Amino acid sequence: MVENRHAGSFRPDVLEGLKSIPKRLSSKYFYDKTGDRIFQEIMAMPEYYLTQCELDIFKNKTADLASLIIPENEAFDLIELGAGDAMKSTFLLRYLVEKKTDFTYMPIDISGNILSILNEKLTRELPDLKTVTLEGEYFEMLQKAASLSDRKKVILFLGSNIGNMNIEEAENFLYDLNRNLASGDKLLIGFDLKKNPHIILNAYNDKNGITAAFNLNLLSRINRELGANFDPQQFQHYQTYDPVSGACRSFLVSLKDQTVTIGEDRISFEENELIDMEISQKFSTEKIEELREKSDFKRVGEIKDSKNWFVDTVWEV
Ligand code: AVJ
């Protein structure tokens, strides 16, 4: 079963961002068909340690993870925010199916393309799993999920997806999430931890230019879907990491003075002008605790990978 709802906010969001000072685009729009494919390439890069770390947790500590999140003797909905191809959660799903746990898996994603790939994979690999895919924005789809059942909810928010929000947005998001859940519901959330800054920068600044292509693809998507005429060759990817704040940021730099048309609108760039593209925030344990307290969750437990580079934390409402 595939639920589909298109927000239609792509065009206004792009125009508002490019008319702001400094210019910005939202990384949530990276994930069209090509973007989904490039992100899968990123996850397979040796530099992009995040996937391997969280996979270590889901593969090798599955039972511990399950015991932290599964309500006792009660059917529940397992809702994954930004599920993508569910590479990591599939290990948990398989474990739960084998234990004959009574639950429905509800993956939410903004990309309908990746959800159909996921649905096909789950039907093939886990035929006994009950799945309801939800295409759209997190909160709209959470409300949709709530309207479909009143069972206890376990939310998965993996991969340090929370890092795509700045700290203030993350605080608001987690607070709103808490308000949208009921007492006893749980959240399993992945945070990428601060570590040697070279390792972090390398993960987002790969020599083969895959991350650069991931950023530039959004310009091509705007061309195709909004009738624009960006020349991606005239923009260059630039990545920064600030080990003090933990903010890892990507930008596109305009390589010359240029004007781009987007339908009726004209956007001018000066040479070296930036478009702020993405933040991938890195966290300290203190910051994670602060986020939990501010958003009113109770602490249940946490599991780290064997290198202590990544943590999956479990909170309860
Ligand atoms: C999917 C948001 C977790 O920020 O690490 C990877 C996306 N961007 N390389 C991240 C991403 C550039 C990724 N998340």
Image (cartoon, rainbow, N blue to C red):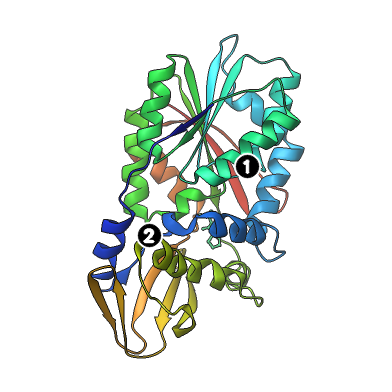
- Position above or below: 222 against 164: below
Q: Earlier in the sequence, mark 1 or mark 2?
A: 2
Element type at mark 2: loop
Which residue: 69% across, 42% down?
Answer: 57
Which residue type carries mark 1? Ile
Coordinates of residue 48 in the picture (x, y in percent):
65, 62
The answer to whether residue 140 is above or below residue 103 is below
Question: 96 or 5, which lies in front?
Answer: 5
Per the image, the residue denoted by label 2 is 26
Residue depicted at 74% across the width and 17% down the height: 99
| Residue hosting label 1 | 117
Q: How far across and down, in percent of the image, does residue 223 sit?
A: 40, 68
Q: In front here: 181 or 112?
A: 112
Along the line of sight, which residue is nearer the eye, 208 or 223? 223
Which residue ends up furthest to the top in the rendered image?
A: 73
How crowded is the residue under tag 2: few (<14 C-alpha within 10 Å), some, or many (20+)?
A: some
Decide if residue 47 is on the left or right side of residue 36.
Answer: right
Quarter of the image that includes the N terminus: top right
Q: Position of residue 252 (x, y in %)?
A: 43, 76
Pointers 1 and 2 in contact (CB under 8 A)?
no
Q: Does label 1 point to a residue whose CB lies under 8 Å from ligand 1?
A: no
Quadrant containing the C terminus is: top left
Secondary structure of the residue carrying tag 1 is helix
Q: Quadrant of residue 60?
A: top right
Q: Amino acid at mark 2?
A: Ser
